[in-house]
Image (tube, rainbow, N blue to C red):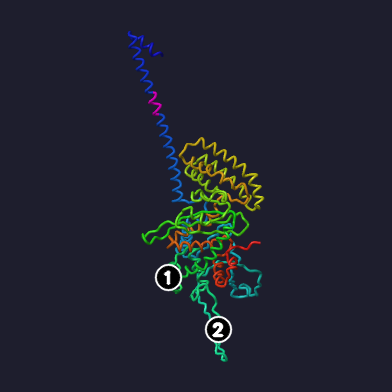
Amino acid sequence: MDLHAELERVMADSAVADTAARAIRKLIEDAQRSATEQITRRTIELHAAQTKIQALTLELAHLRRMRFGVKSEALDAETRDLFQETLASDVAAAEAELAKRQAEAEETPVTPRPKRARAGRQTLPEHLPRIEHHHEPESCTCGQCGQDLVKIGEDISEQLDVEPAKFFVHRHIRPQYACRACETVSAAPIPPAVIDGGMAAVGLLAWVIIGKYLDHLPLYRLERIAARDGVTLSRSTLAEWVGRIGVALQPLADRLTACLLERQILHADETPVQQLDPGNGKTKRAYLWAYMSNVLETGPPIVVFDYQTSRSGAHARNFLGEWKGALMVDDFGGYKALFGQEVTELGCFAHARRKYFDLNAAQAHPIAQEALLRIAALYAIEARGREMSIAERTTLRQREALPLLVSMHEWLSATRMTVANGGGTAKAIDYSLKRWPALSRYAMSGALPIDNNPVENAIRPICLGKKNWLFTGSERAGQRAAAIQSLLATATLNGLDPAAWLRGTLEKLPTCLNSEIDSLLPLRQTA
C-alpha cells in the first residue's frame, strides 16, 4: 500500500499528508531498528549463556568424577572404590552368621552350601616356599572289612599363609687369641656395616626404609608394629637410621641420575607435595619432579625424582643441564624455555584425549565422541606395534598413523571454524591444534612415545602414598625421600624385589669401591 497516496486521498491538504507520511515512516524505521538491536543483543546474551552453561556443565561433571568417581578415564586396581573390600567382607560374615543361626535354630548340623561355579582360583606363586603337612588316616586297615589299605593317589590343596615381621638378634662372637711369645692379642675383624656401631642389622634397616618409602608408613606406625613384639624402637632412633641410610644411598641416586641423562628420549612430570613450614605453623607447597627413560627403548627403565620447593621451570632446566634429546611433557609452561635446537618437544596425546573425555563425560557430545574415536584408532596402531622393533614400528606409524593424523588435523581445523569461542569444545580443539606439531611428532619415529602415561604411572604410588604421610618435614627430608624413591621405583620397574635389592645393597655398600658402584644400581641385566 502507498502510504502517501492513501494519506492524500483522506486529507485535503497535500502538505499535511507529506508530513504525516514522513512521521509514520520514521516511527516504522525506529521500531525496526530497535527490534534489530534487541534481537542482536539477545543473540549475544544467548550465546554467552550457552557458553557459560557448557563450561559449568563440564566443570560440574569433572568435579563429580573427582568427588564420587575415579580420577582417570579407566578403572584400575589402585583407584578402585576402597569400600568394596569392606562390603565383600561384610557379606561373607553375614552369610556365615546367618548359616550358623539357622543351624542353631533347627538344632541340626550345618549343611555345607553348594559351591558356586567359579572361573578358577589363581595358582599360588611357584617361588614361595612350601611347608608340607601329611595327613594320614588313623588306621591303615579298612573300616568295613579289616583288609589293608593300598595308596592309590593323593589329594593336594594349598593355602597361602604369611608370617608378620619377626624380630630376632644376631649375636656376633669374636674370640680373642693371645700370643704368649710376643704378648699380642688378635681377633677377627668387625664385619663392616652401613652404620658403624649401630644396633640395627641390614634386615631391620631395609624393613624401616621399605616401610617408610615404599609402603608409605610414618615412623610412628613402624614404632607401634615393633612394640607389639615387645621391641622398643623410638621414633628418634628410626629417624636417625633413615637419615644415615639416605646419606649412604645418595651416591647411588646420583649415579642413577647420570645414567638417566645418557638417554636420548625422556619423560617429565611433576606432582605437588606439602612441606612443613615451622615458622608459620603450617605447610607450604613443594613439588616432586619426575624424569623417566623412554619405555620403547631396549635398555633397563630408570625413573628419577627431584624434590624442589616450587614449580618453577628453572628446576627442570637445572636438572637436565646440558642434556640434549626429545622430552615428553604436558602443556605446563615451565618446560617451554627448554625447547629449541637441542631439546625437541613431544606432546602427550593422553592429555589431549582427556579434554574430549571430560567434555563427553559432562553430556553426550558428537564432536568429542568423534575426536575420541580418532584418537582410539591411533592407540590401536600403537597396541599392534608394542612388541615390534623400532624400525618396524616406524614403518607401521608412517604407513597407518600419519594418514590418520593428517585427516584428524584437517577435521579439527574445519570443526573449529564452526565452534563458538569460549566454550569447552573450543578449548579442547584449541589445545590440540596449538600443540599439534608436538602431538604428531611421535609418528615420525618408532622410538618416540605417544604419551606421558609411563611417568604418570611411576609417580602415582607417591601421589597415593602422600595421603598417609601428609607432608615432608623439611627440604632436606624431601630430597632424601626423592633419592630413595628413585632407587626403589627403578627397582620395581626393572622387575626386582625392592626389599631384597635394598638388603643386598646395604650389605655390599660398605666395601664397594666407587669404580664398582654401577653393580649396585637397581637395573636389570641386559644381554
- Give the label on residue 187, or none: 2
Q: Secondary structure at mark 1?
A: helix
Asked if residue 505 is among those painted magenta in the image, a careful observer would answer: no
Q: Could you classify mark 1 by the number of other residues whose Cα lies within 10 Å: few (under 14), some (14-19), or many (20 or more)?
A: few
Q: Is residue 120 visible?
A: yes
Q: Residue furthest top?
A: 12
Horizontal relation, residue 73 to residue 10: left or right: right
Rendering coords of residue 245 (x, y %): 50, 68
N-term mark: 1 or 2: 2
Query: Would you name the residue on which mark 1 appears?
Result: 236
Marks counted in the figure total 2
Residue 18 lies, with reference to residue 83, above or below; the image says above
State which quarter of the image contains the C terminus: bottom right
Q: Position of residue 65 (x, y in %)?
A: 46, 49
Give the vertical position of 450 relative to 216 (above or below): above
Residue at 53% of width from left, 80% of height from top? 172
Instruction: Look at the image and give the residue range highlighted in magenta.
Output: 32-38
Which corner quadrant of the image does residue 257 belong to? bottom right
Residue closer to the observer: 364 or 523: 523
| Circles 1, 2 touching at the beta carbon (< 8 Å) | no
Amino acid type at image mark 2: Ala
Q: Secondary structure at mark 2?
A: strand
* Quadrant location, the N terminus: top left
Q: Amino acid at mark 1?
A: Ser
Q: Which mark is residue 96?
A: none
User: Residue 427 location in percent, x, y?
Assistant: 48, 42
Q: Rate crowding at label 2 as few (under 14), some (14 to 19) or many (20 or more) other CA atoms within 10 Å.
A: few
